[in-house]
Amino acid sequence: GAPPLRVLDVRSLADFEAGHVPGALHLDASSLRATVDGISGQVVDAASFAALVGDAGVEPGEELVMVDDGDGLQSARAAWTFRYHQHDAVHVLDGGWPTWLAVTGSAEAGAPLAAPSPYPTPDITPALRVDADWIAARLEDPGVVLIDARTPGEYDAGHVPGAINVPWTTTKSGDPFLGVAELAALYEPTGALTADTVIAYCQTGTRASVTWLTVQIAGHADVRLYDGSWAEWSTRPDLPQEP
């Protein structure tokens, strides 16, 4: 039969110990980010990923469901990070831990119990991540749609030329995400659903992970994350900015 689903709780250790899905593994999503070349929030290298994931008890290729504190940020970021490292069988629990608890009432408390598991250093999936130079070379490409997931205030203060502002919070109704049709209606005016490639960015790449996830739910396959996001772009004097 199909292998069992494993729940991976990506909240803080304190939150996990206070209560979690019975049998869940734990890996704080913030540990999967590092400061690289002065830019915070960047994805860790493959060797670090393997060590962290193995220590959490995750086995290569096993099917995982990410659970966060409900807003989807950490689960989406973790899901992107796993797929970037070619661990593709990952899902996000819509509404996270609060929804699980409200619907099932099932919980256990205490420290993670999983034994570490050997996890070989993976290859990466280059097509899931772009850098500033990739975008700069395609600013005039009509097949590439850039979505800025930050707040309107952040966007108005400066953004990548041609980017369209779709704040990550507009993909949700409370904690759960909007349905497929509603997400399609949200993204359709941007041209994202008919573009060749969609690029999502924010300030350091976490909020944009929600864009990466929800554009796919809405029906577009080729969505990539600009991990450096505005934190990197805004520090490059050679790159254009709007306004």
Image (spheres, rainbow, N blue to C red):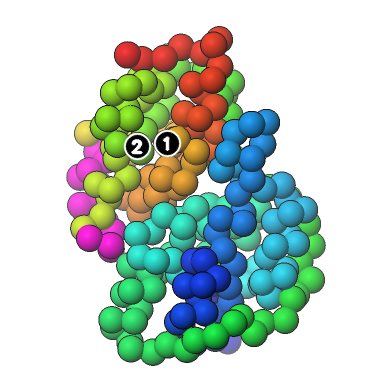
- Main SS of the magenta part reads helix
Instruction: State the separation of the CA atoms marked 1 and 2.
Output: 5 Å
Number of numbered labels in the structure image: 2
User: Looking at this view, is 181 or 205 the one in front?
Assistant: 205
Residue 202 is tagged as 1
Residue 20, relative to residue 123: is it above or below? below
Judge whether residue 6 can be spotted in this image. Answer: no
Residue 198 percent across, percent down from the top left: 42, 35
114 or 191, nearer to the observer: 114
The stretch drawn in magenta includes residue 22: no
Q: Name which quarter of the figure residue 72 lies in.
A: bottom left
Tell whether 186 sits left or right of 1. left
Which residue is the site of mark 2? 150
Residue 119 image position (x, y, % from top left): 76, 66
- Residue 105 in the figure: left or right of residue 6: left
**Mark closest to the chain's N terminus, 1 or 2:** 2
Determine whether, in the image, residue 9 is placed left or right of residue 71. Answer: right
Say above or below: 36 vs 65.
above
Q: Which residues are magenta?
A: 174-188
* Residue closest to the eye, 86 or 24: 24
